Image (cartoon, rainbow, N blue to C red):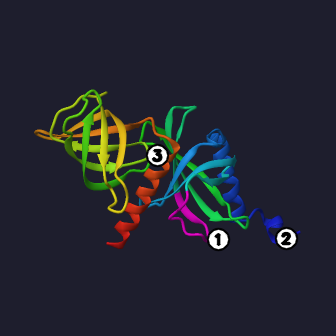
């Protein structure tokens, strides 16, 4: 009989069992199959993936797009995992560590639920570019110039001087990277925040996004992050 058999379990064994008990109590397995974004603790998005094979506090990540800012290493990397549960109709935020397994899959370990609620379900990348919005009810004519404050796979935040209403729909055009074609997508206002007199910020969701659109937005966000790190 080993030393730990005589005097009890090792600290590592106790930690793993406690982690498993937390995962069972939180019923994390309902999130298996959820589309997620994996980010660093300092707010950089690493990877867009599908969370699969979730058992207890362990799972796998199946990348949804080409490219990643996640370093391929066998050492565990602490991350935040963010997604949206259609079953609960809530955003979900979890802590975990990821590592590359011998079969080249991303293994997730020590998953812990941080919170679930009505928070943002997607990572938002701050931007400082000019955009043009045109109301969908208007045919032809000049669009309105505004500031694109940030962008995510789910939508954008726009800063404008003109007053608009919740529910208004626009066609958004914006070039976020000089070497890529501009975004041209439909969006709808969900939230309004008056920052100062005659200046408003509008939280908008994208309309009718295809999988190709989502992948393109993610690649743009990756490109913006690389550009920011080079500055």
- The residue that mark 1 highlights is 74
Placement of the N terminus among the 4 image quadrants: bottom right
Question: Which stretch did the figure color magenta?
Answer: 66-79
Residue at 27 percent of width and 50 percent of height:
149
2 vs 1, front mark: 1
- The residue that mark 3 highlights is 213
Q: CA distance from mark 3 to mark 2?
A: 57 Å
| In-front residue for pair 106/68 | 68
Residue at 37 percent of width and 41 percent of height:
185
**Element marked by disc 1:** loop
| In-front residue for pair 152/207 | 207
**Rendered image quadrant of residue 12:** bottom right
**Element marked by disc 3:** helix
Q: CA distance from mark 2 to mark 1?
A: 29 Å
Residue 62 colored magenta? no
Residue 73 colored magenta? yes
Q: Residue furthest right?
A: 1
3 vs 2, front mark: 3
Residue at 59 percent of width and 69 percent of height:
72
- The residue that mark 2 highlights is 2
């Amino acid at each position: 009989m080993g030393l730990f058999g005589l005097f009890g379990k090792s600290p590592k064994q106790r930690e793993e069992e406690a982690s498993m008990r937390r995962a069972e109590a939180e019923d994390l397995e309902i999130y298996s199959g959820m589309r997620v974004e994996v980010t660093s603790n300092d707010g950089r998005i690493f990877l867009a993936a599908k969370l699969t094979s979730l058992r207890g506090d362990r799972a796998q990540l199946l990348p949804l797009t080409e490219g990643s800012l996640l370093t391929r290493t066998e050492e565990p990397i602490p991350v935040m995992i963010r997604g949206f549960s259609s079953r609960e109709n809530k955003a979900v935020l979890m802590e975990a560590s990821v590592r590359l397994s011998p079969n080249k899959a991303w293994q997730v370990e020590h998953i812990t639920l941080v919170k679930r609620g009505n928070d943002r379900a997607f990572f938002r990348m701050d931007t400082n570019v000019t955009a043009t919005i045109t109301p969908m009810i208007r045919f032809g004519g000049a669009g309105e110039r505004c500031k694109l404050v940030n962008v995510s796979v789910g939508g954008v935040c726009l800063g404008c001087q003109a007053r608009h209403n919740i529910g208004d729909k626009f066609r958004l055009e914006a070039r976020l990277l000089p070497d890529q074609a501009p975004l041209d997508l439909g969006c709808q206002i969900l939230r309004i925040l008056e920052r100062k007199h005659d200046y408003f910020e509008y939280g908008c969701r994208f309309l009718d996004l295809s999988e190709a659109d989502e992948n393109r937005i993610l690649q743009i966000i990756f490109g913006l992050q690389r550009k920011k790190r080079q500055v």
